[in-house]
Image (spheres, grey):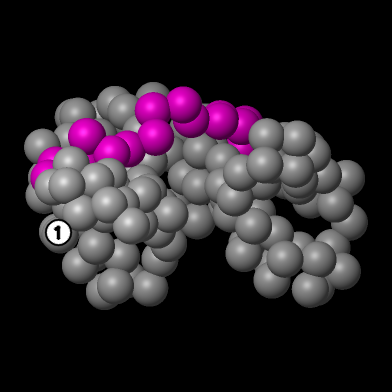
Amino acid sequence: MKVDEIMTKKLEIISADASIYDAIERMIDKRIRSLLVKPKDEHDVYGVITVRDIVYKALGKNLDLNKTKVAEIMSKPLVCVDKGMDVEHAINLMTKFNITRVFISEGKEILGIISLLDFMSAALIKRAREGHGA
């Protein structure tokens, strides 16, 4: 199975200059665990801010959530795989880097994201297609 078959295509994007509070609001409102961070200019690269970043790097350090910017605690560059990559390769990358998501790309364009839950969902779908109901 290829990663583009199971990726989530709807990405929530935030500016690097947004406050941590803005990121928290968006994540809670959308019930998601990460936001794609836009590059500041054509020389910059995408980043990601996660629930883990916010809890460990902001809340855990008592940072001012209104004044601290997403850029100060986000992670970059992204760990990306090409859209035609096998799912197993993506899982191996996640294991190697101890991360819970990888982004799917085609050239410099980010097409989607795959998280641990997406892999579990794909396993259920595969089982159902093979006729092995619960």
Towards the viewer: 38 or 23: 23
Residue 35 position by quadrant: top right
The residue carrying mark 1 is 89
Q: Is residue 45 visible?
A: no
Q: Quadrant of the N terminus?
A: top left
- Above-or-below relation of 99 to 67: below
The answer to whether residue 37 is left or right of residue 80 is right
The residue at the point 82 percent across, 44 percent down is 21
The residue at the point 87 percent across, 69 percent down is 62
Task: Verify whether residue 7 appears in magenta.
Answer: yes
Q: Quadrant of the C terminus?
A: bottom left
| First to last magenta residue range | 1-17
Towards the viewer: 74 or 32: 32
Q: Is residue 9 visible?
A: yes
Where residue 2 sits in the image (x, y, percent)?
A: 14, 42
Indicate the amino acid at tag 1.
His
